[in-house]
Amino acid sequence: MTTPAQRLKTALEAPGLHLMPCCFDALSARLIEQAGFRVSLMSGFAVSATRLGMPDTGLISFAEMLDQLRNVCQAAPGLLVIGDGDTGYGNAMNVQRTVRDYARAGAAAVLIEDQVSPKRCGHTKGKQVVGRAEARMKIRAAVDAARSGANDILILARTDARAVHGFDAALERCQDFVEEGADIIFMEAPHDETEMAAFCAGIDRPAMANMVRGGQTPMLPPRELEALGFKLAAYPLTLMSAAIDAMRAALAAVADGQESRVAQADFEALKSLVGFPDYYEREQAYRAAE
């Protein structure tokens, strides 16, 4: 049987762009899977927001992210999940532990970035990055862990150097990551289509685009992203933001005594989504005879 990493590698080798609505918990992952998407990224921003109600500023811990990743992978076993590993939660040795444990949790790939800890969301202020040599060594450590023992996971290497040192320096880091064996490359927050095209042309690896509405990178339609050379397009906040708007509208309706007007899933459909029919069927096998 092929592993999630092997299936993701095969998907990336085939023509076409993969759209990735990002998940943040088991239910959102299952909805993404049922909608027919093949790949998703478990967004650190969204997990921090939904699990802690806190900003993506390095406050959420490795243990909390790992626990969330296990739930996501178990709830949507057919979905190829990229786990957000942030900075690896420490030095190169911490990076290796993150890679190993994310592989055991069921992730197809793990994202490791070069920000200084505590990190920041890629489209917010206050970002700093570690030195180029340290960034390279952390990706080397990640790749070594991914290729050793029973681990089988792809490495998605991310740089945030565009915001700190400019585009050329960020591209040089991306090229370093390619030389170290990273499987997927992600330059966070290029400023325009020219930079996006130069990024894709400058690396010999599948490239990821991050589509954040209101962020620093242009929101381009999928056909244009594919034409530029991207293989993955992440939408990290789309589901969470849509859910927030829907919940606020529902709360306003309930406050006005209009709960019946709230658009919501049918109760039978909701029970099916979370697995009641399967539970009832399996439960019968263990009923004691009267």
Image (cartoon, rainbow, N blue to C red):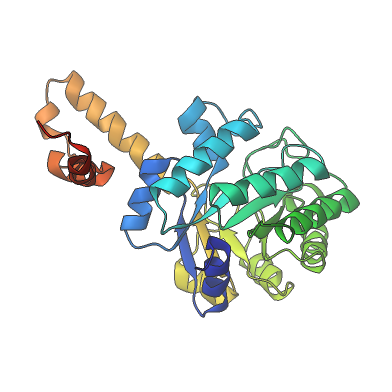
| Relative image position of residue 129 (x, y in whole percent) | 80, 44
Q: Is residue 94 above or below residue 183?
A: above
Looking at the picture, tell me which residue is in the foreground, 265 or 10. 10
Asked if one can make out residue 115 in the rendered structure from this viewpoint, the answer is no
Residue in the image at 82% along x and 68% along y: 179
Position of 4 compared to 172: left or right? left
Residue in the image at 73% along x and 61% along y: 147
Q: Is residue 119 above or below residue 253?
A: below
Q: Is residue 9 above or below residue 284?
A: below
Image-quadrant location for residue 208: bottom right
| Relative image position of residue 257 (x, y in whole percent) | 12, 20
Looking at the picture, tell me which residue is in the foreground, 263 or 38. 38
Position of 8 compared to 37: left or right? right
Q: Residue furthest front?
A: 290
Looking at the picture, tell me which residue is in the foreground, 24 or 64. 64
Residue in the image at 21% along x and 40% along y: 283
| Relative image position of residue 3 (x, y in whole percent) | 54, 63
Looking at the picture, tell me which residue is in the foreground, 175 or 85. 85
Q: Residue furthest bottom?
A: 15
Asked if one can make out residue 194 in the rendered structure from this viewpoint, the answer is yes
Image quadrant containing the C terminus: top left
Residue in the image at 66% along x and 53% along y: 188
Q: How many marks?
A: 0
Position of 47 compared to 84: left or right? left
Position of 132 compared to 101: left or right? right
Image-quadrant location for residue 44: top right
